[in-house]
Image (tube, grey):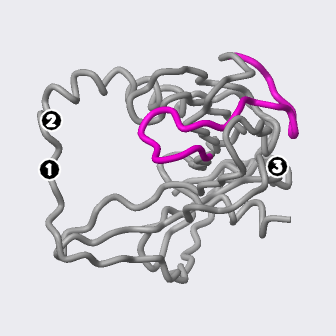
Amino acid sequence: MELDVRDRTFFIGLDRDAGTSAELVFTAGDGQTLTQQIRIQPRDWQIERVNVPLRPRANAEDWWKMREPEWLAIRDARAKDTDAQGWKQDFIWPVTGRISGRFGRQRIYQGEPGSYHSGIDIAPGNGVPFVAPADGVVVLARTGFSLEGGIIIVDHGAGLNSAFIHLSSLAVAEGDSVRQGDTLGNIGASGRATGPHLHWSLMWRESRLDPLLLTGPMP
């Protein structure tokens, strides 16, 4: 990964399934570069092995025709660069409550891995409001998505963004600037959800990150 550190600050993140090492390339103000290898310490993930096959999606082609515009909207939103500075802050929890799903959890179906859980689930109750964990700009705010239901994506700058899904209502619109602690919306069970909860995921460029890395334990 290549980093421009001319202002002496930068942010990097490594995906759950990153290898055991990575190469960092730093670009200085005079254009010179410095390359450094870093070692990656693997984590123990919550893995459940089940003796049933991974079922293919029925009518996959028809489903994708419906899903593709949603997927493209999410992809394009995450690619936006708003120059937000929230990535420099100490992140806060968007809401507190029972953690019903942890980042990285995965099922293995007769040796075939399913998708791992890409965020953290917090279940304080239906309709409870949640707030921005850091400053940013709302780059997506929609309802009615097939999987996510109500969804908000906030760009924190430097390639880092938060997504919040399964919302019952939205309190912001695309293009809004938000400050840490501002109300974004209300928790629900819209989209593909078995009960009301807030699914919060973090991405840096193409890497999915565990929100606990930025917040620390829940207060």
> Disc 3 vs disc 2: which is toward the camera?
2
Q: Which residue is mark 2?
A: 60
Q: Position of residue 140 (x, y in %)?
A: 59, 24
Q: Are marks 1 and 2 in contact (CB under 8 Å)?
A: yes
Q: Position of residue 142 (x, y in %)?
A: 55, 20
Question: How far apart are the alpha carbons under marks 1 and 2?
Answer: 8 Å
Q: Is residue 191 above or below residue 10?
A: above
Part of the protein shown in magenta: 175-197
Q: Is residue 72 magenta?
A: no
Would you say 95 lies left or right of 197 here? Answer: right
Q: Residue at 67% of width from left, 40% of height from top?
A: 126
Tell me the quarter of the picture where residue 97 sits.
bottom right
Query: Residue 56 has which mark?
Result: 1
Tell me the quarter of the picture where residue 159 sits.
top right
Element marked by disc 2: helix
> Disc 3 vs disc 1: which is toward the camera?
1
Q: Which residue is mark 3?
A: 88
Q: Is residue 158 above or below residue 183?
A: below
- Name the residue type under label 2: Ala
Would you say 63 lies left or right of 134 here? Answer: left
